[in-house]
Amino acid sequence: MDTVGTAGFRGEVGSEQWAPAARVRDMGTSIFTEMTELARRTGAVNLGQGVPELPAPPALLQDVADAVRSGNNQYPPAAGFPALREAIAAHQLRRYGLDYAPTGEVLVTTGATEALAAALLALCDPGDEVIAFDPCYDAYAADARLAGARVVGVPLVLDGDGFVLDADALRAAVTPRTRVLLLNSPHNPTGKVFTPEELAAVADVCREHALTVVTDEVYEHLVFEDGARHVPIATLPGMRERTLIVSSAGKTFNVTGWKIGWVCGPAPLVAAVGSAKQFLTYASGTPYQEALARALGSVEEWAAGVRDTLRANRDVLSAGLAGAGLHPFRADAGYFLQADVRPWGYDSGIDFCRELPRRAGVVAIPTSAFYLTPGAPAWLVRFSICKREDSIRKAVEQLAAAR
Ligand SMILES: *Cc1c(COP(=O)(O)O)cnc(C)c1O
C-alpha cells in the first residue's frame, strides 16, 4: 500500500498559524509516492508498489456487475453482508479447522487496512506497546501511533538466503506495557513464511505474557512451495482465544481496489474491533461483499493459478537479479522478494532505487522504508512480482544490460 502522505504541511490557513495534529505530524510523503512518481516520469518498469497487474476472476467481476445492477447498493449490516460472513467462516473451517460463528466472531472491514487500524484502536490504550517483526508493513507503526501506542520492532535475522525469527530477541522485547503482538505470515516485505517451529516459539511468548495476537494473513493463499501450507497461529494450542485473524480479498483475487477485508476471532475481541470500525467506515462495498461471498467458496481453484504465476515470476526475477550480479534472497510466498544491492557498489538501497530507473529502467523500493529499528541493513531492496510476465522479463533484460 501507499502511504497517502498527508501531514508534511504546516503554515498559515487564513490568518491563523496551522499545524496538523501530533498523531499525523511527520507521517509525510513516503518513499512509495516518490518511487511511483519516478516510475511514471521515466516510464520504468514498476516493480515498486505491490499493485497487481494480474487479472481477477471473470465470474467475480460479472457477479459484482450483476449485484450493482440489481440494486444492492445501500449500507450492508455493519458486521458485513451475512452471506460473506458465512463464506468466511466456512473458509476458515474448511482450510484450517478453525470454527468461527458467522454472527459475532466474523467482521467484514474496509480492507485489511481498516481491520488492522480498528484492531489496534480497540486493543491499545495510550502508552501501550505493540510488537512487530522488523521489517514490517508500514501501516503497523502508523496504526499504533493513531491508537497512542508505540510499536516495538523485533528484527528478523538474515541467515543464509532467508530471514529467521530470533526468539530471544522477541522475549527481550516484551515489557509490562506490551499488549499486542502483530504477526504477518506470509510476510511483506520479505516473502518469508514463518516455520512451524517459529510459530510455536511466538505462541509460547504470547501465552506466557497474555498477549493478544493480531495476525495479518492477507497472503494466506499465496504460499508457493509445494506441500507447504499457510498455518494460522490461531490453530496452535491455547491461541484461538487470544488471536484476531485479519485477511482480505485484495491480494487473493487481484482486486486491491475493492478493499474488502475481514477479522475472525473470539466474540469479545471481534466486538471491540467492531466498536472502533463502526465509527471509521460503519460499512462499505455491498456489491463487492455479495459477489465475494460466492467467490470465496471456490477460492482454492482460483488461488492455485495465481500461485503458479507468482512462483514463475519469482523464479524469473530471482534468476535475473542473480544474473545481473545482485544477490536475491529466498521468497516463499506473496508479492515480493528482497535483494542485496551491495554487489553493484551501493550501501544504500535508497540511492540504488533513486538511480535504478535511469540506470536500468526499473523501479523498486528500498527496504529501509519498512524497518522500525535503527541499524537495519540499508542495502536491502524490495522488488514486487505481482506483475505480468512480460513486465518481469523486461525488467530482467534491462537489469542484465545495466550490469
Ligand atoms: C496489502 C497489504 C495489506 C492491505 O490490505 P487491504 O485489504 O488492501 O487493505 C495489509 N497487510 C499487508 C501485509 C499487505 O501487504
Image: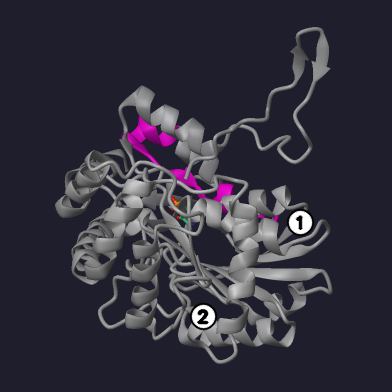
Measured as percent of width and height from the top left, residue 294 is found at: 25, 62
Q: Amino acid at mark 2?
A: Ile
Q: Quadrant of the C terminus?
A: top left
What distance separates the C-alpha of mark 2 from that of mark 1? Answer: 23 Å
Q: Residues within 10 Å of mark 2 (few under 14, many from 20)?
A: many
Q: Amino acid at mark 1?
A: Ala
Name which residue lies at 16% across and 53% down.
Answer: 59
Could you tell me if residue 133 is visible in this image? yes
Q: Residue furthest bottom?
A: 237
Question: Is residue 280 placed above or below 36 in the rendered structure?
Answer: below
Q: Is residue 149 magenta?
A: no
Q: Residues within 10 Å of mark 1 (few under 14, many from 20)?
A: many
Name which residue lies at 54% across and 57% down.
Answer: 115
Measured as percent of width and height from the top left, residue 132 is found at: 63, 65
User: Which mark is on residue 233?
Assistant: 2
Magenta residues, as a range? 355-374
Q: Is residue 364 magenta?
A: yes
Q: Mark 2 and 1 residues: CB-CB less than 8 Å, in contact?
A: no
Name which residue lies at 59% across and 53% down.
Answer: 277
